[in-house]
């Protein structure tokens, strides 16, 4: 068998393996169509209901509890004031696997914030006076988190006031 015979046989063999022009080409390991396409993570995962009863049980009767809703980009900013021992508390639902990020921007050095899982009667998930002005919490289960600004006892006892802003975001993995 000479070179031309082998080349002709190979060409016929390749043509038999090729799809007809009306058939789509099958994907192979080198084809972009072969790569699995993962669905985009949803920023609007099903959220649990806000547990206002548990949230109100964690604060004094004078404290207002406000539910926070996030804008289309998954972030919002709330502003407020701590006067003495009084300050509003903010609650937000977080689904399992989501990350809650809270950045506290105090108007003076006597203001802090704590972040609680309202279902957990233990210590705060984030203690501002120890952990700093930014909380990043990965939710292990569906729940409601409460952000509670406060000031140190000495200034609260004197009835002093201070303003703050809080940037709150919630993202999926």
Image: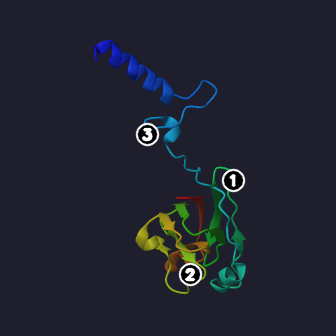
Q: Residue furthest front?
A: 1
Q: Position of residue 102 (x, y in %)?
A: 54, 62
Picture quadrant of residue 84: bottom right
Above or below residue 120? Residue 78 is above
Mark 3, secondary structure of its residue: loop
Nearer-the-camera pick, 40 or 63:
40
Q: Earlier in the sequence, mark 3 or mark 2?
A: 3
Q: Residue at x 64, y 50 (%)?
A: 73
What residue is disc 3 on? Answer: 29
Q: Earlier in the sequence, mark 3 or mark 1?
A: 3
Q: Residue at x 49, y 69 (%)?
A: 110
Picture quadrant of residue 64: bottom right
Q: Which mark is residue 157?
A: 2
Question: Is 15 on the left or on the right of 3, as rendered?
Answer: right
Nearer-the-camera pick, 98 or 54:
98
Separation of disc 3 and disc 2 at Cα? 70 Å
Q: Say if mark 1 contacts mark 2, CB within 8 Å.
A: no
Counting labels gives 3
């Amino acid at each position: 068998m000479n070179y031309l015979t082998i080349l002709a046989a190979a060409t016929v063999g390749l043509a038999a393996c090729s799809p007809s022009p009306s058939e789509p080409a099958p994907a192979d390991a080198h084809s972009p169509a072969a790569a699995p396409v993962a669905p985009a993570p949803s920023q609007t995962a099903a959220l649990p209901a806000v547990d206002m009863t548990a949230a109100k049980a964690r604060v004094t009767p004078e404290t207002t509890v406000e539910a926070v809703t996030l804008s289309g980009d998954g972030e919002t900013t709330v502003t407020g004031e701590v006067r003495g021992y009084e300050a509003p508390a903010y609650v937000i639902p977080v689904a399992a696997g989501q990350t809650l990020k809270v950045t506290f921007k105090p108007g003076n050095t006597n203001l802090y914030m704590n972040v609680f899982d309202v279902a957990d009667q233990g210590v705060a998930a984030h203690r501002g006076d120890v952990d700093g002005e930014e909380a990043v919490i990965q939710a292990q289960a569906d729940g409601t988190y409460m952000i509670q600004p406060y000031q140190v006892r000495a200034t609260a006892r004197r009835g002093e006031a201070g303003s703050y802003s809080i940037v709150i975001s919630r993202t999926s993995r």
